[in-house]
Image: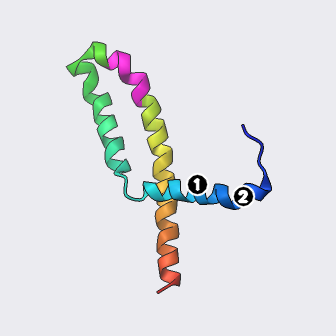
Amino acid sequence: MPDFDPRQYAAAMQRLSMLAGLLDDEPITEMIEYADRIHAVGPFVDPTAYHRGSQNIDDQLRLLRVLKKVQGVVRELKAEAGARHA
């Protein structure tokens, strides 16, 4: 983990805000549902391929679920900012 330099706070926060903003339009819920469907039918459609890729899908789902939470916060903050400027 890199050392945190408080003088870089503003620049780091700007980069993180840009990343968070990118999540607003991503179809994360649909991606989670798709990955869940893969888990549901994959073992029956192609057991060998599913077995090889299932850990990757688990990792993706883990990431997607966290990103879904961040997306929710981003949307809340956006709505609050809009309400303050209305």
Find out whether the residues at labels 1 and 2 contact each other: C-beta distance under 8 Å. no
Query: Which amino acid does the dot numbered 1 rest on?
Result: Leu
Q: Please rate how many residues cluster around mark 1, counting C-alpha atoms within 10 Å: few if below 14, some from 14 to 19, many from 20.
A: few
Q: Write down the residue under mark 1.
A: 16
| Picture quadrant of residue 46 | top left
The reply, left or right, for residue 71 in relation to residue 45 is: right
The total number of labels drawn is 2
Find the magenta span and give its range. 50-57
Q: Position of residue 1 (x, y in %)?
A: 72, 37
- Image vertical order of residue 72 relative to residue 65, above or below: below
Q: Is 74 positioned to the left or the right of 44 in the image? A: right
x and y, in percent, of residue 22 in the image? 44, 55
Magenta stretch secondary structure, dominant: helix
| Image height of 77 relative to 72, above or below | below
**Amino acid under disc 2:** Tyr
Query: Residue at position x 50%, y 84% from top?
Result: 85
Q: Which mark is residue 81?
A: none
Residue 33 image position (x, y, % from top left): 32, 42
From the viewer's perspective, is 84 left or right of 48? Answer: right
Give SS at disc 1. helix
How far across and down, in percent of the image, does residue 50 sit?
A: 31, 20
Q: What distance separates the C-alpha of mark 1 from that of mark 2?
A: 10 Å
Q: Is residue 2 above or below residue 49?
A: below
Residue at the (65%, 55%) spot, across then down: 12
* Residue at (78, 58) in percent of width and height: 7
Looking at the picture, tell me which residue is in the foreground, 52 or 41.
52
The residue under label 2 is 9
Is 6 placed left or right of 58 in the picture? right
First in sequence, mark 1 or 2: give its number.
2
